[in-house]
Amino acid sequence: MKPIKLPKEQRDLITENIRAYFEAERGETIGHLAADNLLEFFLKELGPAIYNGALSDCRTLAVQRMQSLEEDIY
């Protein structure tokens, strides 16, 4: 699976949110590079699971809609 690429603006916003989280919840100050590295780690580790879950949800929805369409036709 290809690595997940985020637009720069979105990546910067998430990185700043990570920094704010560390400050608020842990009382730690981390730099932009550390927050960006953490984001990259989460994208690699969680990205595929989230992506596959979303695909599964889409498949389920498509099957439900096809069944509904079949019922409408009959």
Image (spheres, helix red, strand yellow):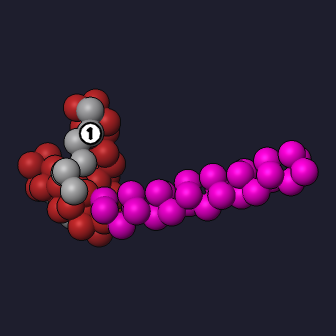
Is the magenta region chiefly helix, strand or loop? helix
Q: Position of residue 23 (x, y in %)?
A: 28, 58
Q: Position of residue 53 (x, y in %)?
A: 46, 64
Q: If the image is split into quadrants, where does the N terminus sit?
A: bottom left
**Depth check, front residue: 73 or 35:** 73
Residue at the left extreme of this rendering: 33
Q: Is residue 37 visible?
A: yes
The residue tagged 1 is 6
Q: Is residue 18 above or below residue 7?
A: below
Residue at left 39%, top 57%?
A: 51
Residue at left 9%, top 49%?
A: 33
The quadrant where residue 25 appears: bottom left
- Residue type at numbered disc 1: Leu
Residue at left 88%, top 47%?
A: 72
Instruction: Please tell me whether mark 1 sits on a helix, a strand or a loop.
Output: loop
Badge 1 crowding class, 10 Å Cα cut-off, few under 14, some 14 to 19, many 20 or more, is few
The quadrant where residue 52 appears: bottom left
32 part of magenta stretch = no
**Depth check, front residue: 6 or 72:** 72
**Depth check, front residue: 70 or 38:** 70
Give the side of residue 50 with respect to residue 9, left or right.
right
Q: Is residue 37 above or below residue 73?
A: below
Q: Specify the segment rendered in magenta.
A: 47-74
Residue at left 36%, top 67%?
A: 49
Give the side of residue 66 with respect to residue 60, left or right.
right
Give the side of residue 14 with respect to residue 73, left or right.
left
Q: Is residue 16 visible?
A: no
